[in-house]
Amino acid sequence: MILPVRPLTIAVGNYGVTRALKNGSIATGRLQLEHIAVDSAVAGMRRMVRALEFDICEMAFTTYLCAKAYGRPITAIPVFITRNFHHRASFFRVNSGIKEAKDLEGRVVGVNRGYTVTTGTWARGILQSEYGVDHRKITWAPTNDEHVAEFHAPSNVDYRFRGQTVAELFDSGEIDAAVGDIKINSPEIQPLIPNAREAGFSYFRKTGVYPINHTVVIASSVLEAEPWVAEELYLAFQAAKSAYLSRLRAGTELTAADEAAIEVSRVVGDDPFPFGVEANRRPVETLVQFAVDQHIIPKAYAPEELFASSTLKLE
């Protein structure tokens, strides 16, 4: 049996689908993994995309697309460890005169963290494709810079509020709406899309798109030296997910996140975390097109261009 010359460093968050991989309760084949603790998944992504600090890392999918467009030497496997419905990710001030999504046009809309954040990309894409919003007629105001430092934003992205939070921008009156994963406890700030959870489920029933958020990437240098790592890593994540699904089906000691996964499975099918290219072709293609439309990447990539070749047929 051939083993890597050293353990491979890996930085992924603590989720149900990663628990068994991180606690060592499932076999990892030929892989030797050294789990690296990071302050947050976001911090790990930035360290990976800017400095290649790990061999393997969790990565927001739009960040990965942007990194690929700018030639960063990382390659994804079709493993998606977080996903969500993003109709919930648009907010507005109730006394702003905004009555429907189209009313965002002509306004400054905050973006939680960077313009290229995956949640914001999904939110803008849904506003455009489902509610007729022309995102080009909106000034998007991110609260932070981008993971991919080389990224050049389109002309309707304004970074003047960088360093402030969305909550602060709402409080100061600088914005009347925002997109992103935002936690605001104020009756003055409400979701823009009514019954957002059901709207997301209806979107899935209509389109077949179950949005992806975070994938897993491998430094290209690792794959050049050890091409088998991609398939072996995919299988390890599959085993960890299987252990998690078994726990969900047992229905004991469930967390709030577990309960949410069970609720989603009633809509999307028994596996609320499908892996593989074919099972995710539609959401991948949709998010890629949203990224093109929003000038995050210059061209569309086919799914086969995005994932390690040895994983393309794995399901």
Image (cartoon, rainbow, N blue to C red):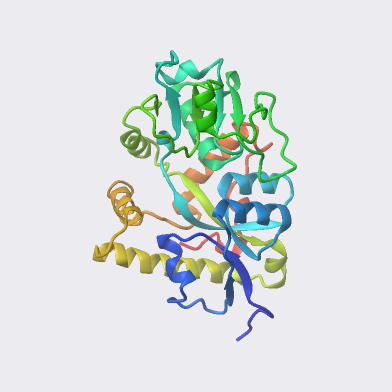
Residue 154 in the image, given as x and y percentages of width and height = 68, 28
The residue at 63%/76% (across/down) is: 7
- In depth, the one of 278 and 203 nearer the eye is 203
| Up/down of 77 relative to 195, above or below | below
- In depth, the one of 163 and 69 nearer the eye is 163
| Up/down of 166 relative to 47, above or below | above
* Picture quadrant where residue 137 is located: top right
On the rendered structure, is 212 left or right of 195?
right
* Picture quadrant where residue 271 is located: bottom left
| Up/down of 4 relative to 133, above or below | below
State how many labels appear: 0
- In depth, the one of 144 and 106 nearer the eye is 144
The residue at 65%/66% (across/down) is: 55
Residue 77 in the image, given as x and y percentages of width and height = 56, 59
Residue 201 in the image, given as x and y percentages of width and height = 33, 39
Residue farthest to the top? Answer: 97
On the rendered structure, is 54 left or right of 60?
right
Which quarter of the rendering shows the N terminus?
A: bottom right
Which quarter of the rendering shows the C terminus?
A: bottom left
The residue at 63%/84% (across/down) is: 2
Residue 28 in the image, given as x and y percentages of width and height = 51, 76
Residue farthest to the left? Answer: 251
- In depth, the one of 303 and 230 nearer the eye is 230
The residue at 61%/28% (across/down) is: 141
On the rendered structure, is 83 left or right of 164?
left
